[in-house]
Amino acid sequence: MGRKHTFMDREFGRDAYDSKDEGTFEEGLVFLITPIQGNNMAEVHSAIEDECKKLQLNAVRVDENVGSGLVIREITDLIERAEFIICDLTSERPNVYYELGYAHGIGNEAMEILLIAREGTTLHFDIAPFRVQYYSSTEHLRTIINKNLVAMIKKSRK
């Protein structure tokens, strides 16, 4: 979601914030920022993808791309094009924090990013103030994804 202002311009009321700048995005595209392995991530990915599909959204993970493309370019492209981003902070992976920071830096706003984490995850200092939805099981995660995406769609597609 490319905008001329950043997430922080909006949050801190800076002059660069433009409430009329809706940015550009590909409607229905959901980019998943997640750890790739560990903590039953295959089940997590499957649950998120299933819930997105129910809402006619296309959930995409960069690790599913084929060929020998430049991965960081594919990641930044998907972050820039996605209508919504789901970011799983479980396992405190540096790549997840980096990608979330990039998403904020190009202007993605709170209603376009869903932050999730498995219960018991410790958040780092700079992420701790954000609203994070903690899940206890795959079924609980499904409920969180569906409820939040429905609300995000209603709010952003006025």
Image (spheres, rainbow, N blue to C red):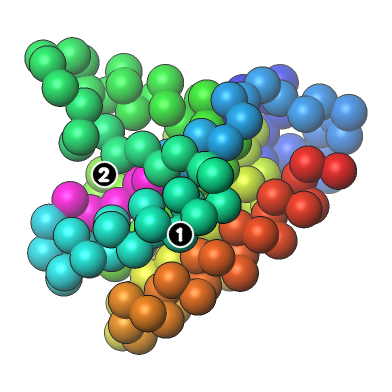
Can residue 105 be seen in this snapshot?
no
107 left or right, relative to 43: right
Q: Which mark is residue 95?
A: 2
Q: Are marks 1 and 2 in contact (CB under 8 Å)?
A: no
Which quadrant: the N terminus?
top right
Q: Is residue 42 left or right of residue 47?
A: left
Q: Is residue 137 left or right of residue 154?
A: left
State the residue at coordinates (38%, 57%).
50
Q: Residue at x 15, y 22 (%)?
A: 66
Q: Locate residue 18, reporting x and y percent.
A: 85, 29
Q: Judge by depth and name the residue closer to the eye, 135 or 132.
A: 135
Q: Position of residue 91 (x, y in %)?
A: 22, 66
Of residues 101 and 150, the one nearer the viewer is: 150
Identify the magenta region: 32-36
Q: Mark 1 sits on what residue? A: 51
Q: Is residue 46 magenta?
A: no
Q: Quadrant of residue 42?
A: bottom left
